[in-house]
Image: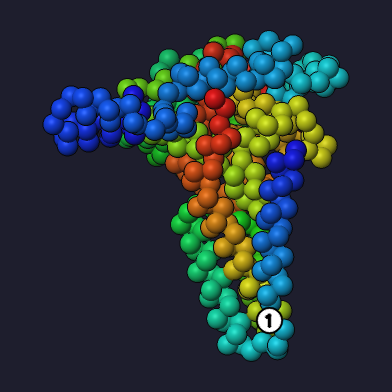
Amino acid sequence: MNVRSAIHVASAAVFSATLALAALALTATPPATAADTIDPAADARAFQKYFTTKFPKLKLEDFVNGPYSMDEGMHRQWEEKEQFPPYEFSLDMGKELFAKPFKNGKSFADCFPNGGIGIRQNYPYFDEKEGKVVTLELALNRCREANGEAPFSYVKDEMAALTAYMAFTSRGKPFDIKIPNDPRALAAYQNGKQYFYTRRGQLNFSCATCHVQSPGERIRAEVLAPALGLLNAMPIYRSEWSGMGTISRRFTTCNSQIRGVPLEPQADEYRDLEYYLSYVSNGLPISGPGARP
Amino acid sequence: MSVIRTSILSLAAVLQIAGATSALAASSEADFKAAFAAAEAANKEAGALRNQWTVTAAALADAKKAAEKGDFDLATAQSKEAEALAKASIYQATSEKQAWKALEIR
């Protein structure tokens, strides 16, 4: 039962003297739209069905390869790129950074379950103590700060290297994002969904304008990636950036490109957006770090 | 891509109307200050809605630069453009509170 229905039922219980009247109130409840009803599992099914129907030749796991899965020629380019992947230097740097002890002798491994190895697919998660979504990038900087180290920039360099290494240790593991039975978690998920579909910026684009309505089509010289599996490949080396970028970089630059002022990296809205987008890609394998044109 | 085109066109229409109402008479420093304050207030409101536009910030910066050079006609015109842009971003944020639902995959 959705929130609106629940309010109608409650009102009926208070104000009506008879069961018949309560029943009448139930039937008089206006039909709710899907957006009013928070049902993440149903959303994920509909989301995946939309893309598999739109691209019937693609296997579900192929969506994690973004634009390279949309075009045969580009797919061949990607296979060749993977022989000498452009993210390799970042991956090596990440491995080194991850193992390097902090000044207090501890390391990143002390902050994460399983020593931080093979856990990328579980991020972001909803922290019931904090009442908010915690992303991997946020958890890495919190780990540094808890151990007396300065946080890294969220958008590239060290943060991209660390998340590249952690993603690499999870390659092939399916996204397994959980939404606990906590109204705050559902609200965070819903906020993320709302952010994803909300038009913004002078160009009046939402995330969905490019990544739901137009995947596989070109915007200038680029082939747009499908939203399904988009975050599985993060972080990415982008030729356009001549370097690596994190999820924070992707979100903020998307906002700038549509002439919207980006929010600060790891703003609640971006954390919720990552939660939503990751959840609806549950079951698809982690493929990061990735490379994109 | 027709959805995108329609959206850009409707925004462009809003901006053209705003541009057409620019003052034709010579502007004073006081005119600029009033126009700039109105633009800043509107942009602040857009900020509270978490929906500022980069072009609004650029128009505000251009207005300030023109005022520093003593060109109050241009400074006032740029301020009015910034205000129109900020108001469009407020309208967008407000209407999208419900409109986003129409795009959802169901």
Give the answer, above or below, for where A182 lies relative to B60: above
Quadrant in which the C terminus of chain A is drawn: top right
Identified at 13% across, 31% down, the residue is: A17
Q: Which residue is mark 1?
A: B23
Percent coordinates x, y for residue A285 in the rendering: 59, 14
Q: Nearer the viewer, residue A194 or A120?
A: A194
Q: Is residue A73 left or right of residue A189?
A: right
- Name the amino acid type tagged 1: Ala
Residue A35 vs residue A200, the one in the foreground: A35
What is the basis of the colouring in this image?
rainbow
Toward the viewer: A59 or A88?
A: A59
Secondary structure state at the residue bearing disc 1: loop
Q: Residue at x 47, y 19 (%)?
A: A42
Q: Does any portion of residue A236 appear in the rendered image? A: no
Seen at 61% across and 82% down, the residue is B32
Residue farthest right in this picture:
A73
Compared with A128, B51 (above or below) is below
User: In screen coordinates, is A223 left or right of A231?
Assistant: right
Residue A222 location, quadrant: top right
Q: Position of residue A234 (x, y in %)?
A: 61, 27
Mark 1 crowd level (few <14, some 14–19, many ≥20, 10 Å Cα):
few
Chain designation of label 1? B
In which quadrant of the rendered image does the N terminus of chain A lie? top left
Q: Please tell me in which quadrant of the rendered image residue A248 appears.
A: top right
Q: Can the viewer see residue B22?
A: yes
Residue A8 shown left or right of residue A83 in the figure = left
Query: Residue at image x 50%, y 69%?
Result: B41
Task: Determine whether A152 is above or below B74 in the image.
Answer: above
The residue sitting at the left extreme is A17
| Image location of residue A178, percent across then percent down | 42, 20
Percent x, y of residue A64: 65, 19
